[in-house]
Image (spheres, helix red, strand yellow):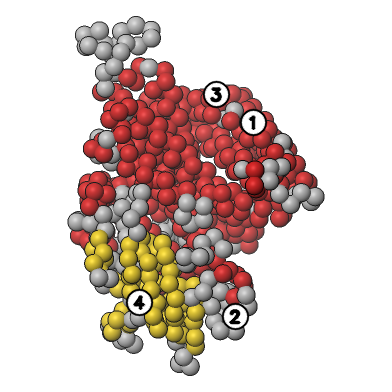
Amino acid sequence: MAEYQAPLKDMRFVLKEVFNSEQEWADLPGLAGAVDMDTADAILEEAAKISNEVVGPLNREADEQGSSWNDGVVTAPEGFKEAYATFCEGGWNGLGGNPEYGGMGMPKTLTGHVEEMLQGASISFGLAPMLTAGACLSIDAHGSDEIKQKYLPNMYSGQWSGAMDLTEPHAGTDLGIIRTSAKENGDGSYTINGNKIFITWGEHDMAENIIHLVLARLPDAPKGPKGISMFLVPKIMVNDDGSLGERNGVSCGSIEKKMGIKGSATCVMNFDDAKGWLVGEPNQGLAAMFTMMNYERLVVGIQGLGAAERSWQSAIEYARERLQSRAPTGAVAPEKAADPIIVHPDVRRMLLTMRAYTEGSRALNHYTAMWLDKSKFGEGEVQQHGEAMMALLTPVTKAFVTDKALDCTVMGQQVFGGHGYLREWGQEQLVRDVRITQIYEGTNGVQAMDLMGRKVVANGGKFVELFAEDINAFISSCGDEMAEFTGPLQAALATLQETTKTVVEQAKADPAIIGASAYDYLHQFGHVAHAYMWARMAQVAQQKMGSDSFYESKLAVARFFYARLLPQAKTHAENIQAGSEPLMALTADLF
């Protein structure tokens, strides 16, 4: 199996040539010259070394060994603790963090590519810094100055890690029915009691302290989601001088045995008279936690992309080397017993599909990150526009990208044939590992409902029109040489706009139409978004043709996407036109 290699050339293509990120950064007041392309190049190079040489080689053995639990003590797989120390020594935990507390303040359009390298090297390992970064983001946005000063510097340094504790055995998607309780102690602290499950890296031996963000209910809290508060609960108490004190009432009851991401510890966490501190306002915990959740959802999409990229790298290497049968057009390697399987049309279909979705997703993740940067570092209308586009695109970059990532890893496994089913080649691990990305941080069905219900129907399609304006502005800027892309793109966008209007109108009378349309709408939208990304990449490739075979291949993949993958958007639109009746007509007892 090919060793993972960070796709630096394609990342730089997206950063520099497709989106001109250096100019984007310069135009955002909140960045104020904090980063330029030389800095970005240096960061990407060093991140690639860590991912390729330190983390990537641990991935298979970590899957074989897994994290272990013994009487409440969780031990990470061999090599993880040392790799985490190396990662933290480089300052990577604080790459996107607030500089006031020791972070580097880099934009998401840069940190997203670093995250892809780490997740491509090992999702299990990458989950630890991912959770810490998300916890830091929530603390920075909602915590008091005292809490931020006390916890953020050591979390940015990696000395302490972070975890988020939401789910309970009876409460997953419906957090409004959680039972974990919080009682005020009269000194600014609270006593936390309850049990949480599915807590990623909730306990481990890689950091000296773990800072939990826990959802719980105050005694007088309203019922439902409006009665949830968020509390910071350290594994080990932190003294006023910053030193560590006694063990808090936080323990790990067990870790889960899972289909994939076996190297990471998925913990059952018990809070027994644990001491915690309120983050944000009472009964506003969901808003505080969703600051973290929305960040995590973007990185989950990046996890899917990383796994798909790693699967592609192995599949293309194997397809060039594996000899089986002769090409349909005649022998390509007559001196050998058979031709390499890359000559066969069906193998090419799989490889091209993998590449089209993977590279399209890389551009789409960057595009989404660009709007996040505008919402964070911009001002006035730019900031508001960024917030609207972020709201629209987050469920797409989480759910559509991970749906296609699973498809890509399955195709990568299929390229290997029987060898793909064996553990030694690594493809079956990628299938198992990436599967969780469709489930955690809000299942993809929930993401589709969020897109259709909250981000489209709730505002009458206003956010979709902002997206359409951006695509139409791009189309207007193109010349006739781009007609092979802009024509189909404009038609696909028009169909998406018509679908949007249809669902918005039907939702006034049919309460089931949002749920009935959500999956297909997500995938129609995702294909149109990828088509837009491939049109932007094709425009650059056309301009650079002849200078590097890289651009020739980009143009060929763009044409493949438009010819063989974009037409799927029409099928999803037709499914939506069928309405909710085919789904709802069958009574439950007849299933």
The amino acid sitting under disc 1 is: Lys
| Residue 5 to residue 79: above or below | above
Residue 210 vs residue 194, the one in the foreground: 194
- Mark 1 and mark 4: Cα distance apart in space: 52 Å
What residue is drawn where x is 45% and y is 73%? 214
- Against 363, residue 412 (above or below) is above
Earlier along the polypeptide chain: callout 4 or callout 3?
Answer: 4
Which quadrant of the rendered structure holds the N terminus? top left
Instruction: Name the residue: 40% across, 54% down.
Output: 111
Which residue is the site of mark 3?
A: 563
- 3 or 2: tag closer to the N-terminus: 2
Q: Which residue is mark 4?
A: 250
Distance from the alpha carbon under mark 3 to that under mark 1: 13 Å
Read off the residue under disc 2: 221
Looking at the image, residue 227 sits to the left or right of residue 141; the answer is right
Mark 1 and 4 residues: CB-CB less than 8 Å, in contact? no
| Separation of marks 2 and 1 at Cα, in angstroms | 47 Å
Image location (x, y in percent) of residue 178: 53, 71
Query: Which residue does the numbered mark 1 point to in the structure image?
Result: 570
Above or below residue 274? Residue 474 is above
Residue at 58% in and 39% down:
523
Callout 4, which amino acid? Val
Q: Secondary structure at mark 3?
A: helix
